[in-house]
Image (cartoon, rainbow, N blue to C red):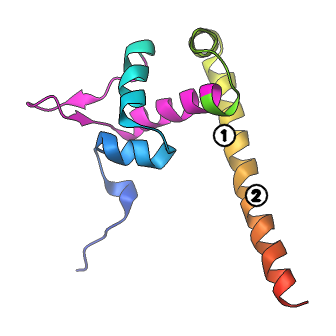
Amino acid sequence: MALDTNKNLKLYYSISEVAEQFGVSESLLRFWEKQFPQINPRKSGRNVRQYTAEDIEQIRLIYNLVKVRGMKLTAAREALNKNRSGVQQTSEVIDKLRNIREELLKIKRSLREFE
């Protein structure tokens, strides 16, 4: 039986992996932990942060509010507290639109090769 190296099977992610995934610094993630109680990674014996898929989803929502939409931290915190499901749906729609845009750009580049 072959080893499955699928990243989705991983239970915990290091802070460096999460920071790289979002293109932010590790210190920003630690700062967001203090500002948003929704982010609560597990800490090992030596205080090494271990993020779960749920933690990463929370970070994705906060990233969308703060970095993509340009909200202040207090406004993002209020948005998450008041309308969490709406924020989550909006974030999912934005992610899907980004993926569609990337696919369209790939198609456009491949069509230019045929000209």
Residue drawn at x 32%, y 68% is 5
Q: Quadrant of the C terminus?
A: bottom right
Is 10 located above or below residue 52 in the figure? below
Q: Residue 103 appears in which quarter of the rendering?
A: bottom right
Q: Name the secondary structure under disc 2.
A: helix
What segment carries the magenta color? 38-66
Estimate the x, y position of residue 58 in percent, counting from the top left. Answer: 48, 29
Is 75 located above or below residue 13 in the figure? above
Amino acid type, residue under disc 2 in the picture: Ile
Is residue 40 or residue 84 the one in the foreground? Answer: 40
**Which label number is shown at residue 60?**
none
Estimate the x, y position of residue 11 in percent, counting from the top left. Answer: 29, 46
Estimate the x, y position of residue 68 in percent, counting from the top left. Answer: 67, 34
Q: Residue 66 appears in which quarter of the rendering?
A: top right
Is 88 on the left or on the right of 2, as rendered? right
The residue to which callout 1 is attached is 92
Distance from disc 2 to disc 1, alpha carbons, whole Å, reads 12 Å
Residue drawn at x 32%, y 37% is 51
Is residue 41 or residue 30 the one in the foreground? Answer: 30
Residue drawn at x 67%, y 19% is 71
Residue drawn at x 33%, y 44% is 16
Q: Name the secondary structure under disc 1.
A: helix
- Badge 2 density bin: few <14, some 14–19, many ≥20, Cα 10 Å: few
The residue to which callout 2 is attached is 100
Q: Quadrant of the N terminus?
A: bottom left
Amino acid type, residue under disc 1 in the picture: Glu
